[in-house]
Amino acid sequence: MPQAFIFIGRSGCGKDTQISLLSDFLKQKSDTPILLIEEGESFRKFFAEEGYPNKLSKAIYESGDRQPDFLACFMWTRTILSHYNGREHLIFNGTPRSLPEAKIVETALRFFHFEKPIIVHLDVSRGWSRKHLISRKRYDDLDVSKIEKRLDWFDRDVLPAIDFFKSNPFFSFHEINGEQTIETVQRSIIVSLEPPPSR
């Protein structure tokens, strides 16, 4: 049966890596295809297009601020409505980024009849995140002031979404210590997702 996974955590916590490893694990278990929902990648493609909304969105990105909820929701809903046919696992990367967006994600998953969508919160401290963002020297991590902005809006906007998932019985919430080796984090995720042995 297809499952929905939502990976959420501070920038630099390793979501991309752990999603790739989980995808490999799922492919070994069954031939169920996987649809990856990458809000960040959708925005990068959006920035490259000509148009007034595209320019406004790119300016927000370049300032380090968070994109508005309506536009963020458009990015992932467009992907799902265009490509989901009811047979794939859905894996969300870094979505949602606010409490209102989290509630809209819930309506989408209920609409598609997912049962117990899985939330994987890769929990890392602000200091750990800052250190890793600076060390990876990616284009959008070169300006420390923009990193601080992203960390600020994570604390302000994303943490309430995480609390919403944690307290909502519709979801299966898994908090994973992300300040470990890649292999240890992967094992922690797999162990957390495996059902308990029957007695």
Image: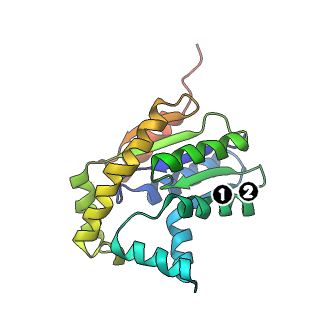
Which marked residue is nearer to the observer: mark 2 or mark 1? 2
**In the orientation shown, which residue stands out farthest toward the bottom?**
50
Q: Are marks 2 and 1 in contact (CB under 8 Å)?
A: yes
List x then y, in percent, for residue 149. Answer: 29, 63
Q: Amino acid at mark 2?
A: Tyr
Residue 78: which quarter of the image?
A: bottom right
List x then y, in percent, for residue 27. Answer: 64, 51
Measured in 3D between alpha carbons, the distance from the residue under mark 2 to the one under mark 1, in whole angstroms, is 7 Å
- Left or right side of 163 for 88: right
Q: Amino acid at mark 1?
A: Leu
The disc label shown at residue 35, or none: 1
Residue ID for mark 2:
84
Tell me, yes or no, if residue 187 can be seen here. Answer: no
Q: Secondary structure at mark 1?
A: strand
Q: Is residue 147 above or below residue 4?
A: below
Q: Earlier in the sequence, mark 2 or mark 1?
A: 1
